[in-house]
Image: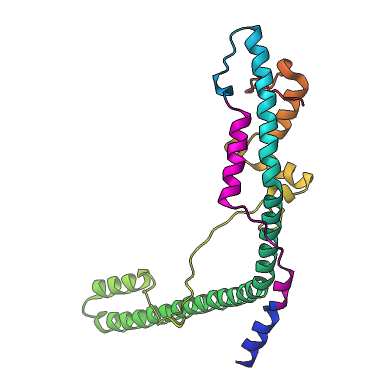
Amino acid sequence: MAASNSTVAEFTRVGQLAKLPAPVTMTEEQLQAIRAEAKRMVEGLDQVRVVDAATYTKADQSRLIIKRARDFIRGKFKDPKEAADKLHKWFCSQERSEDQPLVQLDARLDSEMRSWRSAEQERKREAERQAAEEERQRLQAAALEEAAAISDTAPEMADQIVEQALAAPLPSVVLQDTIPETQTSFRKNWQFAYIGALQGQEWKHLSEEERQRVMQLLPREYLMPDESKIGKVVKALEGSTKIPGIIAYDKGSSQVRG
């Protein structure tokens, strides 16, 4: 019990609460005021329709008002968002700090349980194989004794008994399971690793040499386009892009100045 208390003391740091960032809150009244001001700024702009040069200019002026309204909203939420972000990061940091010793302890116990379980299962399989072999030898010996007893009076039947005994498959022997029932359940969890890389190593962490080796081995149906590289080519060549399987198009974009 003393070890348990020591572990608890190790990852419990109540003093950290003194570093808790002060939250910036927003009342319902403040939110309503922001909403009302933004609505006032863009009042009537939803009636604008672009049908000629004059309304085209009107739409441009409306977009400038909309931009300023959006800047107003973002400005009002800037401080609360930054405070909330700092508070969230603080809690995440504390959570990781408090949780890490338990994560490491649990990972060690999990690894040791799996290793012992695997070794015990292998030991049981080997014991069952040996027991099955001993049972087969016993059955063969009994069959040979039976065949010898009737070899003079029924030689053909004796030969059949010997042949059947020698051709008989290894008998099935199931020994009692020695692995205790526990709260921990184990199941298969097959994963994959890239050839030449460490288990659990993600594609983005592979070296260029390792990637090239894997790309040469992987079947085409398991490959995916390099959208980042394609995007760079399209932006550089625009309508002149010639990549098999790719069509370049101008989606268009705009930016309001002011």
Counting every numbered tag in the picture gives 0
In this figure, which colouring scheme has been used for the structure?
rainbow
**Left or right: 99 as drawn, with respect to 145:** right
The percent position of residue 68, horizontal first and vertical second, equals: 70, 31
- Quadrant where the N terminus sits is bottom right
Above or below: residue 7 compared with residue 57: below
Instruction: Give the residue displayed 71% in from the left and 29% down from the top.
Output: 231
Residues in magenta, as a range:
15-43
Above or below: residue 78 compared with residue 184: above
Front position in the image: 20 or 239? 20
The percent position of residue 114, horizontal first and vertical second, equals: 56, 73
Which secondary structure is most common in the magenta stretch?
Answer: helix
Instruction: Choose top left, top right, bottom left or bottom right for residue 241.
Output: top right
The percent position of residue 224, horizontal first and vertical second, equals: 63, 36
Front position in the image: 147 or 191? 191
Instruction: Choose top left, top right, bottom left or bottom right for residue 65.
Output: top right
Above or below: residue 40 compared with residue 139: above
- Quadrant where the C terminus sits is top right
Instruction: Give the residue displayed 68% in from the left and 44% down from the top.
Output: 76
Magenta-span inclusion, residue 181: no
Instruction: Give the residue displayed 66% in from the left and 73% down from the top.
Output: 98
